[in-house]
Image: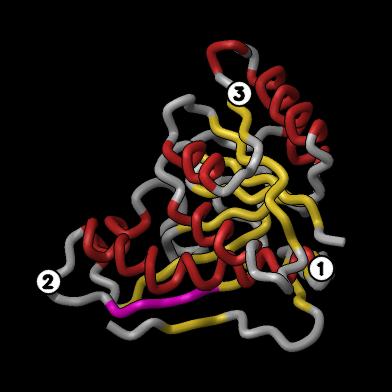
Amino acid sequence: MSVPVAVLVSGSGTNLQALIDATQEPDHPARIAVVLADRPKAFGLERARRAGIPTAVVLKRDHPVRASYDEALVAALREHGVEWVCLAGFMKLVGAPLLEAFPDRILNIHPALLPSFPGLHGPAQALGYGVQIAGATVHVVDAGTDTGPIVAQGAVPVLPSDDEDTLAGRILSGVEHVIYPRALRWAAEGRLRVVRDQPRARVVVDGDAERFVFAAG
């Protein structure tokens, strides 16, 4: 039986689309049970509707107290029997009620090779530092900002002609759309384990797992 997953979005939802495409494959162990947005006009909701996936919207203005907002998210997720949560461009920080409801079961995709360049505008930060390789990271969400243990990463070269948009686009299509569905598969197969036997938590993927990809050009 497939594992029910929620995807949380705020915008166009291209990573959501990659997850939809992957989970529609006959052998994929996960199914997207609900797509939840914090903006009623997020195009990710339309992507979900086209795929026949239930949707929900939880507005921050309806929950002025931070904990109340996260509790509303948890209630919506539990209504759909969700076991894993994927953040896909969800522009809200995850609070304690959500972390406690899904401990080590929330994944996020970030457009940088963490721990470098956390927070907003990862590609722009990479360009500002003059790095030669940029990329993306799937990580387990914790209480910090992009500080959770790493699940998978992928890299692309930084070209002399790059600006923030071209680099972000190459990372998105060449890396993010590859490693996020892969990480979700591992999660749904029960192969992800967060180990806390060192100063920092780390993720172990049981069995064979290609955890790094490099996209040329």
Q: What residue would you read off at disc 3?
A: 58
Which residue is the extreme one toward the right? Answer: 1
Judged from the image, the secondary structure of the residue bearing numbered disc 3 is: loop
Q: Amino acid at mark 1?
A: Arg
Residue 36 percent coordinates (x, y): 61, 35
User: Compared with residue 69, is residue 46 higher up or lower down, i.e. above or below?
Assistant: below
Q: Sequence order check: which comes first, mark 1 or mark 3?
A: 3
Seen in the image, is 12 located left or right of residue 149? left
Q: Sequence order check: which comes first, mark 2 or mark 1?
A: 2
Residue 199 percent coordinates (x, y): 74, 65
Give the residue at x 82% y 34%: 78
Q: Nearer the viewer, mark 1 or mark 3?
A: 3
Its colouring scheme is: secondary structure
Judged from the image, the secondary structure of the residue bearing numbered disc 2 is: loop
Q: Residues within 10 Å of mark 3 (few under 14, many from 20)?
A: some
Q: Residues within 10 Å of mark 1 (few under 14, many from 20)?
A: some
Q: What residue would you read off at disc 1?
A: 193
Q: What residue would you read off at disc 2?
A: 161
Q: The magenta stretch spans which residues? A: 153-157
- Report the Cα–Cα distance between label 1 and label 3: 30 Å
Which residue is the extreme one toward the bottom? Answer: 208
- Nearest the viewer among 50 and 214 is 50
Give the residue at x 63% y 63%: 24
